[in-house]
Structures are given as C-alpha cells and as structure tokens.
Amino acid sequence: MEAKLIHLDEVDSTNRYLRDYQPAEGELATICVADFQTAGRGCGTNRWESERGQNLLCSLLIHPNDIPAAQQFHISMAIALAICDALNEFGVKELSVKWPNDIYWRDRKLCGILIENTLAGSIIRNSIIGIGLNVNQREFHSDAPNPVSLRQILGHDADPMEILHAITRHLNISPCSIDFTRLCYNAKLYWRDGKLHPFRDAQGPFMAEIEEVTNDGTLFLRRDDEKGLTSYAFKEVEHEITKQL
C-alpha cells in the first residue's frame, strides 16, 4: 500500500488527527504514527494504556469506495488478518481474533483496533483504522484484565515501524476477497474451538459455543440453554474475560 506517512511526537488521538486531516489531491492513503497519545482510546469509553515511544500507535486513512456500506465489516476482518500475518513474520504464533477485532496471543490481548467509517450513500467514502499494538512495553498498570506485549512474548524488543510496514504489505481490502477473508477470519476466531465459553448479554451471563461471524459482522453463538443458536450485533454481547495474574 502506497501511503503518505505522518510521524508525530505526541497527539491526542491518531484517529482524531486523521478525521481533521485533508489529503492532497491524488493521495490514496495516509498513515499517522504517534510516539504518545494523550487520549488514545479503544472501543466505547475504554482508554488505551501505552508508555511513550514503546508501542505502535497509528491510524490509516483509506478510501475504499468500492466496498458497499453493508459490507464494511470486511475492513475490520482484513486489518485483523493483516496484523496476524505481519506478526507471524516476527515469530509470534498462537494468535487469534476476538470478535470483533482484538488481536489475542493465547488468552491475552496484544492489539486493539478502532475503525471509523464515513459513508456516502451505499458506499464507504473514508475509513480510519486505528491500531494500538503493544510492542516493547514491559509492564501494564491499568485495570485491563489481560494485556501482553511482543517484548513479553518474544523476550526482546522489536521495531514498531517494521511491524507497521509488514501490516500494510499484508492488508488486502479488495471487494473480490470478501468471502475468502471471512473464511480466514472465522478460522482465526478466539474461542471458536467447539467448546462452551462464558459470555454476557443484556440478560446476564451464559455459556455458548461460537458458530461463526457473517460478512456483516454478526456473531452467531450456540447457547447451552433454551435459546439455542442466537445472533448478536456489535455491543450486544461480550466475552467474559478472566483477569490474568
């Protein structure tokens, strides 16, 4: 992917920076990287913990106007798979994607993704893909239940910019690849192992087996109660994650 690179020492949020950014004519993609974010966030109201200069904090601005708005989850699946493929190059195995798009190593969260799409009728005009990847951080102090970094996994530091370049090499958001991307995404799903796992929805906790995620991002769970196979949209259900010691 050919993209203009903007490197900032500090910013409130790389996603917010690109929301205000005006690309030059003919600029197909833009990447904003920051050494530190004062207001970096995850999904909803969650904050992203990151020490200055230790991790990959970046956002990609792309213009995927050949992807229908109804299939915008394709972008989420594609970037999650690109991150997994890139990290494999650095020797990181046992990666999975926790629906909708957190990257896990074993049972620990390695990377968070925040995507903001701007629609123009039935197509996507702009997509801002925010990535927070724990690279060289040695300790975590927030209330997050299970963070981990590449440094803790591999036992040595890695270059965040090299990882970013690998991610952009692997990123494929062509509309022709939507069905194949979904198959690969489902194969990578965290807890999609034929076993029951703990979830929680508006009615409370329950146990369920993950069936699949569809092209529009709907999660299908096979519950162990009378509800059986049940579909969930974003934020309608969450994994019950146990804090790692």
Image (cartoon, helix red, strand yellow):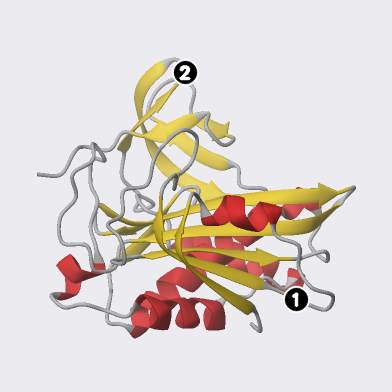
Which is more toward the observer, 106 or 23? 23
Q: Is residue 24 above or below residue 220?
A: below
Residue farthest to the front, as pictured: 9
Q: Residue at x 53, y 57 (%)?
A: 14
Q: Which dot marks residue 28?
A: 1
User: Label 1 vs label 2: CA separation?
Assistant: 41 Å
Q: Residue at x 47, y 60 (%)?
A: 131
Three-letter code, disc 1: Leu
Residue farthest to the left, as pictured: 245
**Badge 1 or badge 2: first in the primary sequence:** 1
Is 9 left, or right, of 60 in this rendering?
left
Q: Is residue 212 visible?
A: yes
Give the crowd class for mark 1: few <14, some 14-19, many >=20 residues within 10 Å: some
Q: Residue at x 33, y 65 (%)?
A: 55
Q: Is residue 100 above or below residue 184?
A: above
Is 205 left, or right, of 234 in this rendering?
left
Three-letter code, disc 2: Ala
Residue farthest to the right, as pictured: 121
Q: Residue 21: horizontal and vertical position, in percent?
A: 70, 59
Q: Residue 148: horizontal and vertical position, in percent?
A: 23, 57
Of helix, strand and loop, which one carries label 2? loop
Which is more toward the observer, 207 or 134? 134
Q: Residue 30: horizontal and vertical position, in percent?
A: 65, 71
Is 168 left, or right, of 127 in this rendering?
left
**Quarter holding residue 79:** bottom right
Is 48 left, or right, of 113 in this rendering?
left
Image label count? 2
Q: Which dot marks residue 202?
A: 2
Q: Residue 177: horizontal and vertical position, in percent?
A: 69, 72
Locate the N terminus by quadrant.
bottom right
Foreground disc of the pair 1, 2: 1
Of helix, strand and loop, which one carries label 1? loop
